[in-house]
Amino acid sequence: MEKVIEAYRQWRFHNTAFFLLSMALFLWLVKETSLVIQVVSLMGNLEYIGAFVAGIFFVSTFTVAPSAVILFHIAEQLNPLLVALSAGAGGVIGDFLIFRFFRDHIFEEIRPIFMKLGGNALSRIISTPYFAWFLPVLGAIIIASPFPDEIGIGLMGISRMKNWQFLALVFVLDTLGVFFVVTLARSL
């Protein structure tokens, strides 16, 4: 067993494989178990703490739907602005975990593939002054939208954005995005 674990760690794409396997496991849990329904009802009972935890999961493709349901139910009973602030703070944690994982692990693993597919030319284009501001702005628009944040985080990860800049920006964007969703849901 130790040899298998060591071989996995030495494998070039072990972080990418872990990421894909975790997404497949989550999809299986959603489809085959009632665990997600139980978590949704538990988080709804925790009020602002539930909003904070739901905010952590609101940023991912695979957890945005149950998180949005939790936030909607919490915002029906509590102040939508405070729910958005709590969820925005949670969203910062979720986004930062994704940001660091992509920047520190996934991008390094796929760099050789990127370079074989014309990476030098793309790197020169991305390094131009036009893209220096365009990638973070496009990433910010994606993060602020109700869509999951992975693509926006990836674009910000490609840019040379500092951690503190990323954290401040995603707090504002996540809070606005959650506020928009809960306000829209309450008005329907």
Image (cartoon, rainbow, N blue to C red):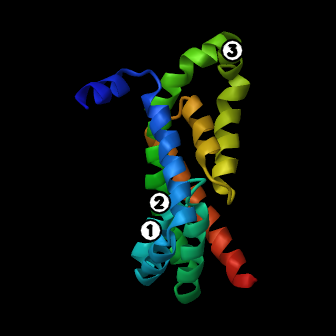
Q: Is residue 165 visible?
A: no
**172 horizontally vs 51: left or right:** right
Q: Hey, what amino acid is under mark 1?
A: Phe
Please report whichever mark, 1 or 3, sits nearer to the chain's N-terminal start: 1
Cα distance in 3D space between marks 1 and 3? 40 Å
Secondary element type, mark 2 = helix
Report the number of numbered marks: 3
- Residue at 56% x, 53% y: name it: 60
174 or 19, which lies in front? 19
Secondary element type, mark 3 = loop
Which residue in the protein does label 2 denote?
Answer: 56
Which residue in the protein does label 1 denote?
Answer: 52
Q: Is residue 74 visible?
A: yes
Could you say where residue 148 lies in the image, as x and y percent from the top left? Answer: 63, 53
Q: Is there CB contact under 8 Å for labels 3 and 2?
A: no
* Residue 114: quarter of image: top right
Label of residue 36 in the image: none
- Residue at 54% x, 64% y: name it: 32
Q: Residues within 10 Å of mark 3 (few under 14, many from 20)?
A: few
Could you say where residue 62 lies in the image, as x and y percent from the top left? Answer: 58, 55
